[in-house]
């Protein structure tokens, strides 16, 4: 390698804080390039006769930092083809410097060496200004690319590269998804310099009354109040661990996978009820109850040493990626029907040889412990995939009439066992009709159950207003109120949609 790109850190403060070796190299170089001249030492170096070329004009012509960094690196490689050069960046070359990382990654593709020289990181100035010890746990995050799930709320958070009010507003809105609106944020400008200032404001005012520049960083202290962590997944996991722990709840500690089965089913139905009611607050509560069941089962698995919630999350994450090749891969799918076909094919191929040996029938994959109407629907779907199905609705209607006739014959013969069997056949045939029209029979019957409950409750309330015990009310009077309830129900449906 003939030429060299020497990367120097300008430090975070004034010229007095710069290491002597770095200072001497800056004074002696004839090919100095700056990522930005907006730094406290540059004016002092200029006064001492140091000349340079900066890339500030690239920032002025583009609001896309990634393209600016790409262009800076491109020009550095070009300059290094004819001369060894020095590239100076704020702070330390390996702290929050994407251009330096790009140079290191692309180094094997160029006949140019890349050498890093020291420089004081702005973090030193931040720790001193804030008087915090990073050993307690801290995160350094990039304000430009900040993501909502990045901050660990129980650690010191420092957010760098908050250049302007737009970036500050972006950071504020993301943080308000995780932190209380009033949470204190310290805005640190020029950490480690003579012009260092610290201003603490409520989070919601971050972009309102505080001036920011390229030497601005934000600091959020760790959250120690447990109630403020109740939105965090780690907090939920900790609560479940405590409930199942030695000093936890006797009821939670005695539960097993088997004992919890009925509760999972109940909570799932309550979620469906909340959806039908279009009640978001109720839905939040019921989804939480379903999540509780998942967490309890995962904790039982962890307590028994077989699996934990991480295994559950890993399993579903890998499955979602694997079964969506049109999203996470190169496959192109244009309709929901195509997606369903690919999903089913991938699911089929995922079966291990052991599973295939156990699954002697295509119907064996339909669980036996789900509601009977749902199981009937799924059994018919499986059979339909291999062609065992009607492609017209008329035979289905004929089958329903046939089953009703056979049920009537069992009634006429006073055959109790036959009545049960034939009534089941009637329901199975009706499920076939529902499936033909893409109606979920379980949801449909659930909807009717809720409708019946609502109308009958109306009858009870109206009779109570009259002072008439329902046991003494005539069928004719109850029918009158039933019809009133029907009209009210239809009126409500028309206003809900």
Image (spheres, helix red, strand yellow):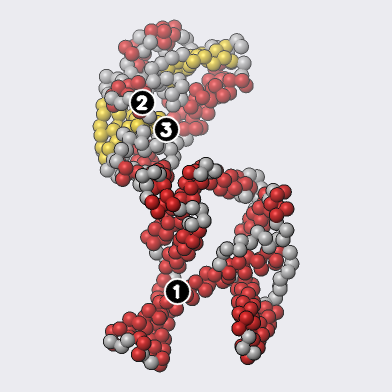
Question: Do residues under tags 3 and 1 come within 8 Å of each other at their CB atoms?
Answer: no
* Local crowd size for mark 2, using a 10 Å CA cut-off: few (<14), some (14–19), many (≥20): few
Q: Is residue 450 above or below residue 110?
A: below
Q: Residue at 61%, 49% (x, y): give it.
A: 324
Is residue 231 shown left or right of residue 425? Answer: left
Q: Quadrant of the C terminus?
A: bottom left
Residue marked by disc 3: 142
Per the image, the residue denoted by label 1 is 450
Residue at image coords 45%, 20%:
93
Displayed quadrant of residue 374: bottom right
Front residue of this view, candidates 61 and 65: 65
- CA gap, disc 3 and disc 1: 51 Å
Q: CA distance from mark 3 to mark 2?
A: 17 Å
> In the structure shown, which secondary structural element does the residue marked by tag 3 occupy?
strand
> Mark 3 packing: few (<14 Cα in 10 Å), some, or many (20+)?
some
Q: Secondary structure at mark 2?
A: helix
Residue 246 visible somewhere in the drawing: yes
> Label 2, on which residue?
134
Image quadrant assignment for residue 170? top left
Which of the two residues, 252 or 85, is positioned nearer the viewer here? 252
Q: Tell me which label, 3 or 2, sits earlier in the chain.
A: 2
Q: Is 33 situated left or right of 358 in this image?
A: left
Residues at discs 2 and 1 in contact (Cβ within 8 Å): no
Residue occupying image coordinates x 40% and y 30% = 140
Q: Nearer the viewer, residue 98 or 46?
A: 98
């Amino acid at each position: 390698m003939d030429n060299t790109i020497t990367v120097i850190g300008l430090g975070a403060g004034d010229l007095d804080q710069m290491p002597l070796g770095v200072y001497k190299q800056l004074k002696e170089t004839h090919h100095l390039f700056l990522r930005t001249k907006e730094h406290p030492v540059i004016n002092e170096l200029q006064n001492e006769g140091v000349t340079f070329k900066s890339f500030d004009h690239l920032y002025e012509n583009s609001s896309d930092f990634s393209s600016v960094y790409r262009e800076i690196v491109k020009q550095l490689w070009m300059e290094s083809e004819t001369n060894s050069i020095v590239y100076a960046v704020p702070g330390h070359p390996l702290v929050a410097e994407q251009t330096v990382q790009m140079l290191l990654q692309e180094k094997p593709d160029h006949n140019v060496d890349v050498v890093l020289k020291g420089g004081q990181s702005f973090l030193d100035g931040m720790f001193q200004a804030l008087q915090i010890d990073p050993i307690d746990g801290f995160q350094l995050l990039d304000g430009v690319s900040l993501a909502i799930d990045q901050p660990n709320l129980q650690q010191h958070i420092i957010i760098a590269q908050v250049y302007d009010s737009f970036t500050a507003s972006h950071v504020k809105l993301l943080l308000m998804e995780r932190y209380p609106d009033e949470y204190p944020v310290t805005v640190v400008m020029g950490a480690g310099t003579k012009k260092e200032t610290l201003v603490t404001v409520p989070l919601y005012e971050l972009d309102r009354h505080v001036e920011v520049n390229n030497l601005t960083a934000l600091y959020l202290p760790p959250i120690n109040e447990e109630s403020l962590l109740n939105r965090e997944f780690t907090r939920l996991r900790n609560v479940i661990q405590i409930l199942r722990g030695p000093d936890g709840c006797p009821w939670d500690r005695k539960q097993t996978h088997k004992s919890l089965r009925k509760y999972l089913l109940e909570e799932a139905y309550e979620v469906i009820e909340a959806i039908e009611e279009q009640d978001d607050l109720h839905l939040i509560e019921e989804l939480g109850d379903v999540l509780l069941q998942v967490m309890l089962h995962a904790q039982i698995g962890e307590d028994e040493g077989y699996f934990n919630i991480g295994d559950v999350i890993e399993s579903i994450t890998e499955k979602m990626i694997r079964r969506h090749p049109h999203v996470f891969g190169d496959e192109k799918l244009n309709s929901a029907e195509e997606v369903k076909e690919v999903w089913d094919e991938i699911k089929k191929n995922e079966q291990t040889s052991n599973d295939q040996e156990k699954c002697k029938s295509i119907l064996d994959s339909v669980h036996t412990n789900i509601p009977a109407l749902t199981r009937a629907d799924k059994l018919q779907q499986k059979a339909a995939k291999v062609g065992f199905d009607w492609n017209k609705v008329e035979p289905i209607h004929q089958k329903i009439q046939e089953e009703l006739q056979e049920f009537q014959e069992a009634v006429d013969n006073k055959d109790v066992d036959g009545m049960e069997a034939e009534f089941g056949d009637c329901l199975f045939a009706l499920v076939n009709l529902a499936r033909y029209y893409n109606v979920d029979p379980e949801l449909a019957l659930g909807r009717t159950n809720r409708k019946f409950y609502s109308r009958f409750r109306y009858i009870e309330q109206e009779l109570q207003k009259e002072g008439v015990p329902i046991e003494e009310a005539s069928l004719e009077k109850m029918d009158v109120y039933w019809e009133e309830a029907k009209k009210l129900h239809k009126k409500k449906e028309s206003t809900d949609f």
